[in-house]
Image: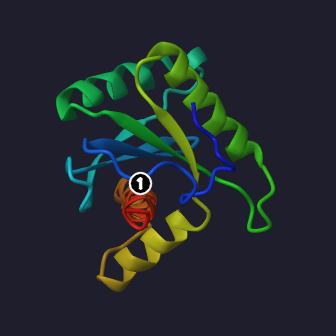
Amino acid sequence: MTDPGATAGTGPAWTRGRRLGLDVGTARIGVASCDPDGILATPVETIRVVDGDPGWAAELRRLGELVSEYDAVGVVVGLPTSLKARETASTAMARSFAEALTTGSPELPVELVDERLTTVTAGAALHGAGRNTRKQRDVIDQAAAVVLLQAWIDSRHARR
């Protein structure tokens, strides 16, 4: 698992292949994907977090299906921190999920990236488009995954 300070611009330049982006939360995991050339991130689905599921078994099973379905060559997991870049309970949860993913699929590169304000950005964009964000939490989670994956993609292409 790569955690280069959990910033979007510190990893290697782009290598071809589809990635999945994950916005891990206490109730849901927003999932996004990009095309193999890394041009555009798009929403995929929202995975419900099973309360009391030790080791993320159900969530990892579904994510494994998505990795196969999308032929993903890597996963980008958002690392939520406070605005002052301090770790929170949500940070620990995202790290736990990324670690479980790495343990369960050691051949799949997993990278943690800073995701501060992605949910806020996604919610504002959806609200600006006339969507009722209170009733569409699943959509917000997917949109947050899109925002974080697109930022990661853009940072890789900037280093070409």
Q: Residue at x 39, y 65 (%)?
A: 154
How packed is label 1: few (under 14 Cα within 10 Å), some, or many (20 or more)?
A: many
Quarter of the rendering containing residue 124: bottom left
Q: Residue at x 41, y 25 (%)?
A: 108
On screen, residue 97 above or below 133? above
Q: Position of residue 133 (x, y in %)?
A: 41, 69
- Is 17 left or right of 109, judged from the image as shown? left
Q: Residue at x 49, y 27 (%)?
A: 50
Question: Which image quarter is the C terminus in?
Answer: bottom left
Q: Which residue is mark 1?
A: 145
Question: Which image quarter is the N terminus in?
Answer: top right
On screen, residue 63 above or below 58? below
On screen, residue 32 above or below 111? below
Q: Residue at x 44, y 67 (%)?
A: 134
- Is 62 left or right of 92, judged from the image as shown? left
Q: Position of residue 110 (x, y in %)?
A: 49, 34
Callout 1, which amino acid? Ala
Q: Position of residue 138 (x, y in %)?
A: 37, 53
Which residue is farthest front? 160
**Does dot 1 land on a helix, a strand or a loop?**
helix
